Image: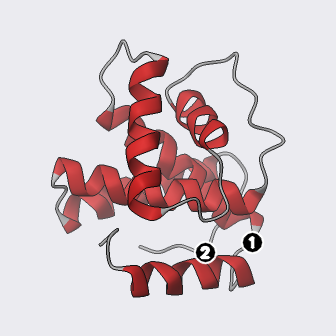
């Protein structure tokens, strides 16, 4: 799916236009990113391992408006590192990184549609518990 450039371009265009995306939905994507990276990366995960993953992701999808450092910071924060600053990362970047990381992890781990649905549902529940009210996909 990552290599299907036409589909990737359609998704990116929707992201750029902000179609239906509110802060609550971006927070849900961020929570999904946190859950999926915890499932993919086995502790202890070091920075070079994350850097290799982000480099491979960037090779597959191109720069598309997000930077390597931002992606690495979001992944590291998702893995529970507390000395990583992510507050200043633009919501559009959080959205793009979250979507692309989820796609690559799902592809690499061979996640079934049912398992992907479980992760999304868990992200929706956690996001709601944190006070956000995202539009539910489930």
> How is the protein colored in the picture?
secondary structure
Task: Give the position of the N terminus as an image quadrant.
Answer: bottom left
Left or right position of 119 against 67: left
Numbered disc 1: secondary structure: loop
Relative to 130, residue 45 above or below: above
Q: Which mark is residue 22?
A: 1
> Which residue is drawn at the image coordinates 75% and 58% (left, top)?
91
> Which residue is drawn at the image coordinates 62% and 61% (left, top)?
95
Crowding around mark 2 (Cα neighbors within 10 Å: few <14, some 14 to 19, many 20+) is few
Specify the quadrant of the image occupied by residue 29. Answer: bottom right
Crowding around mark 1 (Cα neighbors within 10 Å: few <14, some 14 to 19, many 20+) is some
- Residue 122 appears in the figure: no
Return the disc, 1 or 2, that comes first in the chain's sequence. Answer: 1
Specify the quadrant of the image occupied by residue 25. Answer: bottom right
- Residue receiving disc 2: 135
Specify the quadrant of the image occupied by residue 132. Answer: bottom right
Relative to 84, residue 112 above or below: below
> Which residue is drawn at the image coordinates 19% and 56% (left, top)?
111
Confirm or deny contact between disc 1 and disc 2 (CB under 8 A): yes
Report x, y in % for residue 138: 41, 73
């Amino acid at each position: 799916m990552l290599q299907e450039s036409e589909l990737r371009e359609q998704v990116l265009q929707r992201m750029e236009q902000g179609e239906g995306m509110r802060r609550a939905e971006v927070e849900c994507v961020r929570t999904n990113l946190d859950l999926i990276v915890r499932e993919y990366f086995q502790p202890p995960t070091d920075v070079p391992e994350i850097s290799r993953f982000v480099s491979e992701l960037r090779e597959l999808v191109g720069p598309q408006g997000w930077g390597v450092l931002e992606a690495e910071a979001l992944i590291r924060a998702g893995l529970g590192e507390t000395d990583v600053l992510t507050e200043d990362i633009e919501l559009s970047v959080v959205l793009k990184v979250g979507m692309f990381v989820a796609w690559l992890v799902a592809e690499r781990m061979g996640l079934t549609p049912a398992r992907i649905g479980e992760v999304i549902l868990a992200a929706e529940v956690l996001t709601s518990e944190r006070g956000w009210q995202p539009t539910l996909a489930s």
